[in-house]
Image: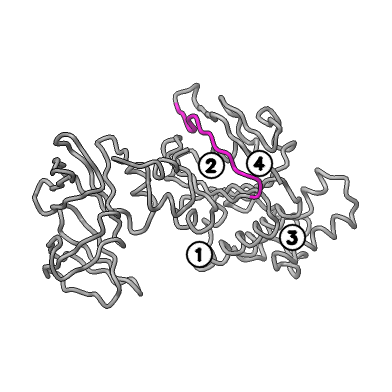
């Protein structure tokens, strides 16, 4: 087991014309499960490949334990990587695929290699598949083989590069649970890259959010969800996405009065202070909005989406404003309803997208 430390990591392509990773510094503690999430092209897989030694950093350092491995080749780093496309040898059996790394990088005897492979296969529930070849396996079985191949090496660090993207939704949930169980059982440091923010929130001890190669925020999933440090994080984390409304903010005594350009959204908040009239963006999560009888914001129902236990109500409120409610709340399209939310659940962002009047607790989530 080992700590992974990235210091000011940078990766450029095309002689510096493309910056894939820009000054990223992250420490993953011994035995911690860190998820790295962001949209396509944000630099998350490139960061992982630099940890693995598959990409050479343009600047910055990579440490595994106390050892600087920045200039070491991939084979000399005690890491195991699980890929999206499984990366199994089609002409080799499951046993041969799982034993290949042991045969190439250890001095174990044939009987010792067999013992370790059978141990890992039993842990993954694929002991009966050892003599089959990849073409005979389902997608879930192939992923278990790829995980078993990583486990059998007992590395210091597990690296996962979107390993569940090729699986159907039900199997993804099953494998998600399996990976968490294995990581906790083996207590191995793990870095898990995904574009799926739900995966990132449910699996990680902490999650790191990247955008355009820049680290936006890192922290416990609940902290990131409740206290995003900027508008991008607020909109990226959570489903349905946070509602955003452009508002004119005016001082109102010790409070701030907010109003959208069309006047459909009016609200007064005590959670922020400003000195002068300014343009802000108000953010509120759909699940934090409630339908009330009186004393709230009136709006017209545009669409009602039933999604099982919940309904998503789309309102004509300065923008497409979504309210997430219990399934028994089902207004008709065109109805006028009143909604409200707790002032503590309101997020305000300045024109640069940064959170307004964040206290120390909120800022502590930013690396």
Q: Main secondary structure of the magenta part?
A: strand
Q: Residue at x 27, y 66 (%)?
A: 312
Q: In front: mark 3 or mark 2?
A: 2
Mark before the other along the chain sequence, 1 or 4: 4
Where does label 3 land, which residue?
A: 94
Spatial separation of the CA atoms under disc 3 and disc 4: 31 Å
What range is drawn magenta here? 18-31
Quadrant position of residue 332: bottom left
Name the side, left or right, on which 317 lies relative to 34. Answer: left
Magenta residue check for 294: no
What distance separates the C-alpha of mark 3 from that of mark 1? 22 Å
Is residue 95 something that shows in the picture? yes
Looking at this rendering, what residue extends furthest in the bottom direction?
A: 328
Whole-number angstrom distance, CA of label 2 to CA of label 4: 19 Å
Residue position for label 4: 3
Q: Residue at x 20, y 37 (%)?
A: 274
Numbered disc 4: secondary structure: loop
- Circle 3 SS class: helix
Q: Is residue 59 left or right of residue 121?
A: left
- Residue under pointer 2: 45
> Which is more foreground, mark 2 or mark 4?
4
Q: How many marks?
A: 4
- Pointers 3 and 2 in contact (C-beta within 8 Å): no
Q: Looking at the rendered structure, which numbered label has been put on residue 141?
A: none
| Mark before the other along the chain sequence, 2 or 1 | 2
Position above or below: 326 against 82: below
Q: Which residue is mark 1?
A: 168
User: What is the C-alpha distance between the residues marked 2 and 1?
Assistant: 21 Å
Q: Are marks 2 and 4 in contact (CB under 8 Å)?
A: no
């Amino acid at each position: 087991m080992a700590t992974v430390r990235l210091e000011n990591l940078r990766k450029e392509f095309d002689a510096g014309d493309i910056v894939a990773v820009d000054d990223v510094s992250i420490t993953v503690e011994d035995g911690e499960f860190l998820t790295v999430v962001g949209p396509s092209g944000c630099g998350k897989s490139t960061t992982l490949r630099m940890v693995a030694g598959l990409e050479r950093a343009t600047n910055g350092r990579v440490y595994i334990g106390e050892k600087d491995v920045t200039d070491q080749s991939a084979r000399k780093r005690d890491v195991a990587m699980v890929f999206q496309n499984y990366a199994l040898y089609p002409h080799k059996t499951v046993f041969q695929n799982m034993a290949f790394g042991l045969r190439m990088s250890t001095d174990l005897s044939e009987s010792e290699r067999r013992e370790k492979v059978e141990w890992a296969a039993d842990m993954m529930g694929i002991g009966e598949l050892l003599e089959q070849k990849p073409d005979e396996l389902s997608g879930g079985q192939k992923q278990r083989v790829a995980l078993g191949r990583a486990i059998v090496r007992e590395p210091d660090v597990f690296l996962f590069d979107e390993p569940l993207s090729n699986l159907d939704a039900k199997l993804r949930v099953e494998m998600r649970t399996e990976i968490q169980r294995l990581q906790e059982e083996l207590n191995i440091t793990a870095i898990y890259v995904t574009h799926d923010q739900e995966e990132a929130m449910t699996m990680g001890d902490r999650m790191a959010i990247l955008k355009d190669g820049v680290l936006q925020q890192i922290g416990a999933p609940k902290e990131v969800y409740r206290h995003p440090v900027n508008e991008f994080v607020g909109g990226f984390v959570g489903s349905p996405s946070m509602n955003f409304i452009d508002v004119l903010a005016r001082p109102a005594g010790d409070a701030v009065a907010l109003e959208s350009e069309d006047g459909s959204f009016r609200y007064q908040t005590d959670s922020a202070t400003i000195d002068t009239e300014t343009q802000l963006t108000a953010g509120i999560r759909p699940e934090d909005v409630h339908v009330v009888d009186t004393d709230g914001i009136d709006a017209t129902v545009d669409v009602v989406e039933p999604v099982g236990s919940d309904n998503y109500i789309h309102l004509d409120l300065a923008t497409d404003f979504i309210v997430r409610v219990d399934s028994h709340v089902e207004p008709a399209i065109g109805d006028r309803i009143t909604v409200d939310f707790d002032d503590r659940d309101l997020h305000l962002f300045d024109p640069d997208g940064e959170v307004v009047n964040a206290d120390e607790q909120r800022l502590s989530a930013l690396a």
